Amino acid sequence: MPLSGTNAPTREWIIEGISAYQELLTARQEDVARDLEIYIPPGERLGDLVIEAKGLAKGFGDKLLMEDVEFSLPPGAIVGVIGPNGAGKTTLAKMIVGQEKPDAGTLRKGDTVQLAYVDQSRTLDPEKTVFEIISEGQDEVMLGKVKMNARAYCSRFNLSGADQQKKVSQLSGGERNRVHLARMLKEGANVLLLDEPTNDLDVNTLRALEDALDKFAGCVVVISHDRWFLDRIATHILAFEGESKVTFFDGNFTEYEEWRTQQLGDAATRPHRITYRKLTR
């Protein structure tokens, strides 16, 4: 069901999300780490308030990117953020991490929220090796409370053998993405903010990432153009639809598209250029 504008999240899906989150928290993390190819350690337990927007608005130049945006993320949600390039998806991510400020409305984070942000810049020291970047020069890495051999951890991101001794300057786009993910996902955050995490990933790493996110005991916000990826992992969709409108929907990408087609008919599936409302000050 859509949850946009002034519509409040229903109590039922908040309870369902919290229940799923509690199940993940009670799992033995040693067992989860052993069973998953990519293991994302949980951070501190989340409270009822994760990230909440009320009346959120943000402009860029003379364009109003978003207006009257409202959502409240449950602890166990995986939220797919979709929309054309330039619609405001990355701007929203920057507001969540505090790099940008809203022009109107509020964006609140819970007191227990610990964010890990994997942005599109993939900034890494070009002179360091893959192993140095991921392990910080240590033989073992801590994944939350679980200790793992650093080289074995690198291998889980399909970075094994000679690949670990490559300098960052020698890496392909897909390799850089895997190194960045490996470095950030071991931090022990309870809210992950991932901007296009599937870019240039090989199929094996992509499937391992899907499994890891599905078993992650926290909340995930994923900006992605990969509808198949979002269909497999998303519990909710935050859609930038043009005309400064953002819709929060309870369901995956296909369910969102089906609902949108019911609302708009054939016009929902026609390609169109993103449009903005004029910013008035």
Image (cartoon, grey):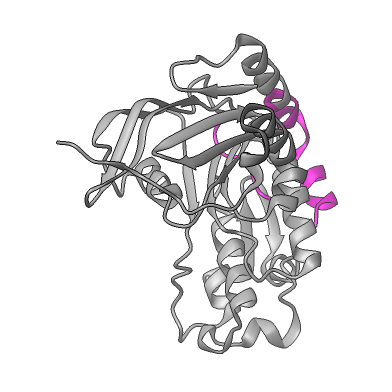
Q: Say which residue appears at 63% left-offset and 27% top-offset.
A: 263
Residue 139 placement (x, y as % from top left): 63, 70
Relative horizontal placement of residue 60, taking residue 36 as reference (left or right): left
Q: In which quarter of the image is the N terminus?
A: top right
Identify the residue at image location x=61%, y=55%: 225
The correct choice, above or below, for 222 with respect to 132 in the image is above
Tally the numbered discs.
Answer: 0
x%, y% of residue 163? Answer: 68, 84
In the image, residue 122 sits, relative to residue 160, either above or below, namely above
Of 163 and 4, nearer the camera is 4
**Which quadrant is the C terminus positioned in?**
top left
Residue at the (55%, 83%) spot, across then down:
129
Q: Residue at x 69, y 23 (%)?
A: 22
Give the answer, above or below, for where 200 lies relative to 234: below
Return the residue found at the far left: 281
- Is residue 223 within the magenta segment? no
- Which residue appears farthest toward the right when viewing the image? 35
Magenta stretch in the rendered image: 21-45
Q: Residue furthest front?
A: 266
Does residue 36 appear left or right of residue 129 in this picture?
Answer: right
Q: Does the magenta stretch include residue 31?
A: yes
Q: Considering depth in this image, is 210 or 37 the residue closer to the camera?
A: 210
Q: Is residue 272 left or right of residue 20?
A: left
x and y, in percent, of residue 137 in the image? 54, 74
x%, y% of residue 60?
27, 50
Out of 216 and 200, give the one closest to the viewer: 200
Residue situated in front as seen by the camera: 266 or 77: 266
Q: Is residue 165 visible?
A: yes
